[in-house]
């Protein structure tokens, strides 16, 4: 075995060799290389705080699309809100997605994989109730009326910021790329609304890491906020803190803009940033025989 540059093998895409200092160069996406995993978490918590404060200065509550992961920022954010007495009662947080059972219903909040349960344990339940977003402002897309998300966003005057990460196949939220043999144009993919969908095997496999690699317990269905809603936000703020994201970050920034890598569509957004851990910024080591 030997370690080499991707350029040593013509079968490997050039974007894999983009050095950290060149990430995002030639694109409109602002790339920020942070420190370790906790540095990413602290920065993401601070970005949430900034959105709350910006909206409050305008006399309103923020409207945000938010992920569960990266998972370390919510307790930090809760500490900020409590310590600084930031009033978030009028803020609306729209979670990106939720797992569904085989019957198409959201898994119970008590299920260990439930995103609803996670948000309650790691964020809402840590907040001073006098500061926390009101229960009716803690939104999850539902399988019975996915279109309600678009209606809520319109009623709120749009989304201030969409936060998120990047999946191993480039997905944002659970907006999975087309299956092999399917063709969806960039324009069509960008207009996909909030909807129920089947999760790809790639997503289920990487998500099984959270349960020791047991893919059988990862649900096959989910409901997700659509690309239309994510890209319609005034600001898109993505964060990556997993070592395996080194390659997909490069694909999103320097590969083709295509539905096959949904995150590549942030290059079409007027105000998108990607903040990553220093180890994600390093080019992936390619082991070649």
Image: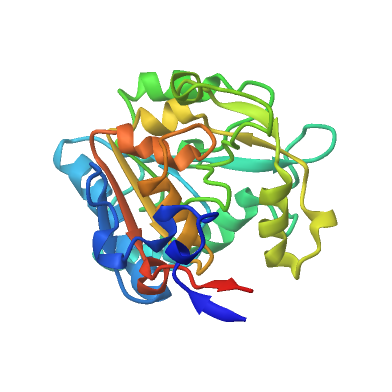
Q: Residue at x 38, y 50 (%)?
A: 238
Image-based side of 70 in relation to 156, left or right: right
Q: Residue at x 56, y 36 (%)?
A: 175
> From this viewpoint, is residue 108 visible?
yes
Quarter of the rendering occupied by the N terminus: bottom right
Quadrant of the rendered image containing residue 44? bottom left
Image-based side of 10 in relation to 54, left or right: right
Q: Position of residue 230 (x, y in %)?
A: 42, 33
Residue 134 vs 223, above or below: the answer is below
Q: Residue furthest bottom?
A: 1
Residue 71 vs 232, above or below: the answer is below
Image-based side of 212 in relation to 63, left or right: right
Q: Position of residue 94 (x, y in %)?
A: 47, 38
Give the total number of marks visible in the rendering. Answer: 0
**Closest to the observer: 89 or 23?**
23
Q: Residue at x 23, y 33 (%)?
A: 270
Quarter of the rendering occupied by the C terminus: bottom right
Q: Residue furthest left?
A: 57
> From this viewpoint, is residue 81 visible?
no
Q: Position of residue 225 (x, y in %)?
A: 53, 32
**Closest to the observer: 120 or 87?**
120
Q: Residue at x 77, y 34 (%)?
A: 105
Colour option used? rainbow
Q: Position of residue 104 (x, y in %)?
A: 78, 32
């Amino acid at each position: 075995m030997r370690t080499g540059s991707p350029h040593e093998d013509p079968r490997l895409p050039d974007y894999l060799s983009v050095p950290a200092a060149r990430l995002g160069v030639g694109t409109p996406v602002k790339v920020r290389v942070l420190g370790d995993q906790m540095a990413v978490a602290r920065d993401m918590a601070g970005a949430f705080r900034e959105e709350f404060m910006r909206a409050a200065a305008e006399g309103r509550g923020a409207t945000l699309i938010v992920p569960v992961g990266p998972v370390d920022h919510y307790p930090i954010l809760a500490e900020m809100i409590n310590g600084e007495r930031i009033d978030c009662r009028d803020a609306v947080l729209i979670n990106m997605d939720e797992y569904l059972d085989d019957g198409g219903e959201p898994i119970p909040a008590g299920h260990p994989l439930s995103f609803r349960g996670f948000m309650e344990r790691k964020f809402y339940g840590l907040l001073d109730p006098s500061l926390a977003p009101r229960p009716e402002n803690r939104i999850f897309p539902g399988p019975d009326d996915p279109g309600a998300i678009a209606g809520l966003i319109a009623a709120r005057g749009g989304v201030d910021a969409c936060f998120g990460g990047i999946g191993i196949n480039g997905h944002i939220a659970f907006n999975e790329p087309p299956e092999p043999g399917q063709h969806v144009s960039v324009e069509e993919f960008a207009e996909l609304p909030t909807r129920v969908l089947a999760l790809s095997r790639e997503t289920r496999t990487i998500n099984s890491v959270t349960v020791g690699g047991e893919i059988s317990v990862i649900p096959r269905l989910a409901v997700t906020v659509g690309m239309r809603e994510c890209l319609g936000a005034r600001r898109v703020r993505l964060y990556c803190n997993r070592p395996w994201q080194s390659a997909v970050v490069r694909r999103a920034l320097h590969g083709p803009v295509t539905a096959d890598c949904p995150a590549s569509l942030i290059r079409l957004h007027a105000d998108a940033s990607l903040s990553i851990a220093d180890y994600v910024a390093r080019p992936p080591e390619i082991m070649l025989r």
